[in-house]
Image (tube, rainbow, N blue to C red):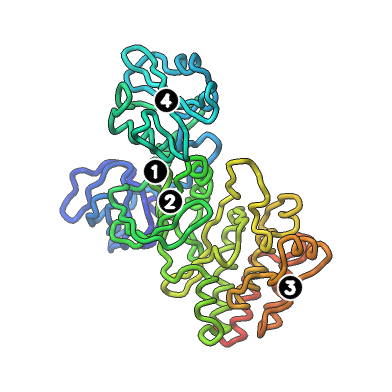
Amino acid sequence: MSGKHWAPGTQCVAKHDHTKPKAQELAFHKGDLITIIEAVEGKGWYRAKHNDTGEEGLLAASALRERGAIRVNPKLSLMPWFHGKISGVQAVQELQPPEDGLFLVRESIRHPGDYVLCVSFAKEVIHYRVIYEENTLSIDNEQRFYNLIDMIEHYMKEQGAICTKLVKPKPKSGMKSAEDELAKAGWLLNLQHLTLGDRIGQGEFGDVLQGEYMGQKVAVKNIKCDVTAQAFLAETAAMTKVRHKNLVRLLGVILHNGLYIVMEFMSKGNLVNFLRTRGRAVIQTRQLLQFSLDVAQGMDYLESKKLVHRDLAARNILISEENVAKVSDFGLARVNPKGTDTTLLPVKWSAPEALKHNKFSSKSDVWSYGILLWEVFSFGRAPYPKLSLKEVTEMLEQGYRMEAPEDCPATVYMLMRSCWELEPGKRPSFKKLTEKLQKELKHLGDV
């Protein structure tokens, strides 16, 4: 990788220790996270900043590798110590040979809905019933926790009501620790460097907070429920595979109280609110076209990586300080702990084949993009005004399509209609949509 050129802001991982630096060089250990500041004279050297110490200095490109993409399969777990429904006898077998502080968590067979913490101590295995009530978990009715991850984190730090501090998790066979894998790939951030501020949004699954990480403004999604946090690993993994100017950038992950997903901060909020609060008097057609093009380019890149968004809508497009539109919340298969419940689908944005047969593809994303275009050119109005979800589904089947928004250029409305072809194969690709919007902007005299 020494021949590779890294742009400023690229996050890299140190390949080995460098603990005795020469003057002006940066000291680091294998696995440390380093941010490139700039390339310097002389081939293959960079000025860079150490993500933990904040120190800056020079280092050779050959000492670094780019952060790896994370592959999430069912084997990557935030709770590798969770063994599900096993008996007490099986738990004792799992915790052999005995070792003080070796532990696992299982579902209680005798008390459905509760859990059992099994801890090896003084050559015995002790079973603690974890009672689940009023959305909290407790062993002693004193200390209460929102989820199992919190509980385990607490008892690894202090003994409290149990026989010994938890020292070593016993992973379920075939499970890998998400924490280890995230750290190895260079995506695990340090909680100490994160300062959390005000709430800037509220998603279906948790709050989005403004914060600061190592002096950089960030947005932080906090997911407390451990089942949902586990499912969100997939979204996080999707974000580690991609980097494009029109996609919101993942900076890393912190595992604490569930999951903190740390992303770049987008100061002007989401596209719906941006359009609604400014309106026709402020925003010109050129700006609307530029936002539409930004989104198409981001989606073209996702399509090239074979990633399907599934929830493309103006509410999931964020606007930067420089008025660049970026796609967020991608890679998120609708997370629902109770199995696939299509009532969670955003009906007014979903393609007919997604609604009827749960079929998602880049072509179903294109349908949603057509709806997003309608939102943009109507300055943030909700699609299918005055129609109920049931009416939308029925009328689409009968061939109904929305009229053009007021003052919408005819060529843009034609694009929308092409996205709403019933047959997925007849819809344009995002590459084609990008080309047409570029032509449209050029036509407006913007080269």
Q: Residue at (50%, 74%) from the top-left corner? A: 274
Please state which amino acid type lies under the numbered disc 4. Leu
Secondary element under disc 2, as helix, strand or loop, is: strand
* Mark 1–mark 2 CB contact (< 8 Å): yes
Please state which amino acid type lies under the numbered disc 1. Asn
Residue extending farthest to the right is 398
**Cα separation between marks 1 and 3:** 44 Å
Secondary element under disc 4, as helix, strand or loop, is: strand
| Numbered tag placed on residue 117 in the rendering | 4
Q: Return the residue at label 1.
A: 257
Q: Residues within 10 Å of mark 2 (few under 14, many from 20)?
A: many
Please state which amino acid type lies under the numbered disc 3. Met
Q: Return the residue at label 2.
A: 222
Q: Position of residue 80 (x, y in %)?
A: 46, 31
Q: Position of residue 437 (x, y in %)?
A: 62, 76
Compared with 112, 372 (above or below) is below
**Cα separation between marks 1 and 2:** 8 Å
